[in-house]
Image (cartoon, rainbow, N blue to C red):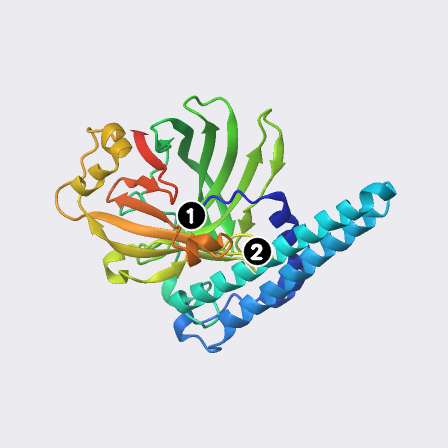
Amino acid sequence: MKKQWDFRKHLMMGGCIRIVLAVFLVTAISSLNFDAKAAGNNDACAETSTFAQTACQNAANEVYQLALGKCENERESNQDSCESDAKAELDSSLKDCQDQYDARQAVCEEVGQGPYLPTGIAPFKPFSLPDDKGYFPLKVGTKYTYKSYDTKGNIIETDVVQVTNKTRTLLGVKCRAVQDTVYKGNAQVDKLEDTTDWYAQDRFGNKWYFGEIAQQFDEEGILIAIDGSWTAGVEGAKPGILIYAKPEDHIGQGYRQEFALGEAEDDSRNVDFVTLAYLNKYAYFSANFPKSIKIGSGKVILHTQDFSALEPASVLEGQFEDKFYAPGVGLILTVGPDGTQEVLVTIER
């Protein structure tokens, strides 16, 4: 999920948590177990939630103490209101810490309580550059254009995804670079976000996600943040499966798509398969999805739900993203919890 954190959360999670978790999460890359449910320490996931909550609370208190120091340098008549605002901000930040803890605990119940150990597993080698098959084809040169519609049919954003010929080696795995650029409105002019994602494929055909550099821009085109960025192998960050080669074998199963604690914690679950006709209930998809793209009949479209403990409502309140993937095409529709619809409108190969 695209993470548009507010400033308070960025301060809360981005400072102390890096120090604590860098020590806690760095693990050997030669583990022999991918499935968290079968790994040795059956309390690892819950313990991770506790450490992350403590780091979150410490960071929130650090921001609060700095705010109080700044209040001391206000005019005396303003100090009481300054301190009151700082306390309100602290209370809100600590509530966020608790919500993230609760969300992580719920995620643990779904993906498993064991430690997350996905890399360096002999049965999953050799990795290769991703192919152009399955539910997430990555053929070099392919360009996907998506439009996001609000509930009134207005175009909010344009998202252009380009499969490049560039590669990067992470954890000894050569990964394909995919450029994902989001623009405001209908025109490809005002850039809001520019992300480079890295993908690889194991010998079973599962597509793996190895990290991203996500740059966010203000209305003047000035870089203002890189929230959500992570790189497999850096500060304990670990890759995850973006999509299974045979998702039918994993229906109802939750799994990690990325794991950089406090920065990137996207998860997904495979829900079911639906027909193209089923998607006609989404009006803007029905009106804008290219008729030239042939999907085939029957229940061949994969339906997933994406969620993240960093967005607690997506876990605790069911405010996840519904995504739909077509075989040989890829992602064709995303439906947000607010009713927005991001629709594939063109493919250039």
Residue at image position (64%, 56%) is 91
Q: How crowded is the residue under tag 2: few (<14 C-alpha within 10 Å), some, or many (20+)?
A: many
Q: CA distance from mark 2 to mark 1?
A: 31 Å
Q: Residue 245 sits in which quadrant?
A: bottom left
Locate residue 208 relative to residue 248 in the image: left or right: right
* Residue 320, x across and y down, in percent: 39, 50
Q: Residue furthest left?
A: 297
Secondary structure type for disc 1? strand
291 up-or-down from 207: above or below: above
Near-viewer residue (259 or 73): 73
* Residue 110 vertical position relative to residue 139 in the rendered view, above or below: below
* Viewer-closest of 339 and 294: 339
Amino acid on which disc 1 is placed: Tyr
Near mark 1 (Cα within 10 A), the count class, few <14, some 14-19 or many ≥20, is many
Residue 199 is marked as 1
* Image position, residue 28 (x, y; %): 55, 68
Of the 4 image quadrants, the one containing the C terminus is top left
User: Going by the image, does 33 lie left or right of 51?
Assistant: left
Q: Which mark identifies residue 291?
A: none
Residue denoted by label 2: 96
Q: Nearer the viewer, residue 272 or 126?
A: 272
What residue is drawn where x is 52% and y is 31%?
192
Image point (26%, 60%), residue name? 251
- What percent of the width, then of the height, locates residue 143? 36, 31
Q: Secondary structure at mark 2?
A: helix
- The residue under the point 56% across, 62% down is 98
Disc 2 residue type (three-letter)? Asp
Residue 348 visible: no
Task: First in sequence, mark 2 or 1: give its number.
Answer: 2
